[in-house]
Image (tube, grey):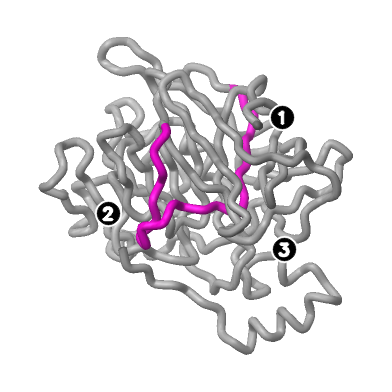
Amino acid sequence: MRTRKRTVPAGAALLCVLLAGASAGCQQSGVPGGHSPFTGKAARAAPVLAVKIDNVRAARPQTGLDGADIVYVERVESGLSRILAVYSSRLPSAVGPVRSARESDLELLRQFGRPAFAYSGTQAKLDPVVKAAPLYPLPAGKTGEAYFRDRSRAAPHNLYLRPERALKAAAGASTARDIGFRFGAAPPGGRNTSSYTVRYPAARFSFAWSPERGGWLVSMDGGAVKAASGQQLAVPTVVVQGVRIRPSRYHDRWGAYSPYTETTGAGPARVLRGGKAYQGRWSRPSADGGTDFTTSAGAQLAFAPGQVWVVYVPEEAAGGGAR
C-alpha cells in the first residue's frame, strides 16, 4: 500500500514547536495550528473521508487500516463487527474491503461536518436517510472509477476503494476539525496494563502493549492485524467507550434488526496509552458536536499522538477486559 502523506509546511511546524511552551493551542486545536485534530500530529487542512470496512474473517487482511487517522469498531448483526475508518492526514492508495452502511454511522459522522462517506450500499429503506444526511454519500456503482474488485477474493469481500478518486466526487467535503480529542502528556495514575481484550458475541479484539513499538499491538479473533509494511499494527491510543446499543429501525429480510450504537450522551470510557489503562468518562451532548473524554476526577484525558482506535461496547463492559 502506498500512502500520500499530507504534511504541514516546515515554517508552520517550527512556529508550533516554538509556541508549544507558551500555549497548548498548537497541540490541541488541530489543523489551524498545523496539527491534525484527529491524531495530534503534523498535518495540513484536508477533506475527511470515512469508509465502512468489512471485518469478518473472509475480509482479512484488510487494506489501508494503518493509513487511517481514526478507526471506529462497531457491533453489527449476529454479534459480528464492522469498522468505520476515518482518513484525512493520509490517503492510502486503496482501502477495503468496503461494506454497507448502518443507521448509527450517520449520527457518528455528524461531528465531522459534511464528510465524504464511502460504503458498498444500504438496505432500501435506509438509502433515502443516508442521502438526506449531512454528508457526501459515495456508494459503490455511483462514484465513477473510485471502486474496483479484487478478483483473487470471493464476493462480497472483494470491493475496494481508491480514496483520491472518491474525494473527487465530493469536492465540498469538510476538512478535519476539532471533534473533542486532546493530545498531550498522560494524566497521573492509571493502572499498569499489559493487554486488554474486548469481546463481542462473535468477535474479539485484543491490544497488547509493546514498549519497543510504543503502541498497542492489534489482533482480531486471535490474528495479528498487519500494516502495509508487514509489521503488526501498533496503536498509540485505544478508547473502549461504553455506550447504549439497541435495535435500530431497520432489519434484514429475515427480520433481524441491526444494532444501533448511540454515540451521543455520556458514559464510561477506558483509555489505553503508554502501557496503562485510565478509567474515565465520555460526553457528547449533541450529534453536531465532538466527544469530550475526562478522567474520573474530571480532568481532560489526553491521548498519545497518532492513530486512535475507538471500540464501542455496552456500558457495563467498559470497565473490564484488562489483564
Against 213, is 265 above or below? above
Query: Label 1 belongs to which residue?
Result: 267
Nearest the camera: 189 or 42? 189
Q: Which residues are magenta?
A: 222-244
Q: Position of residue 302 (x, y in %)?
A: 74, 53
Please identify the quarter of the rendering in which residue 280 is found: top right
Nearest the camera: 304 or 54? 304
Q: Residues within 10 Å of mark 3 (few under 14, many from 20)?
A: many
Query: Label 3 belongs to which residue?
Result: 28
Magenta region includes residue 209: no
Q: Residue at x 52, y 53 (%)?
A: 234
Against 31, is 128 above or below? above
Q: Secondary structure under badge 1?
A: strand
The amino acid pointed to by label 1 is Gly
Nearest the camera: 280 or 211? 211
Q: Gap between marks 1 and 2, in whole Å? A: 34 Å
Q: Earlier in the sequence, mark 1 or mark 2?
A: 2
Q: Gap between marks 2 and 3, in whole Å? A: 31 Å
Query: Label 2 belongs to which residue?
Result: 161
- Label of residue 172 in the image: none
Q: Quadrant of the C terminus?
A: top right
Q: Secondary structure under badge 3?
A: helix
Q: Gap between marks 3 and 1, in whole Å? A: 23 Å
The reply to whether dot 2 and dot 3 touch (C-beta < 8 Å) is no
Q: Earlier in the sequence, mark 2 or mark 3?
A: 3
Please identify the quarter of the rendering in which residue 156 is found: top left
Q: Residue at x 23, y 58 (%)?
A: 146
Q: Earlier in the sequence, mark 3 or mark 1?
A: 3
Q: Quadrant of the N terminus?
A: bottom left
Q: Residue at x 71, y 29 (%)?
A: 267
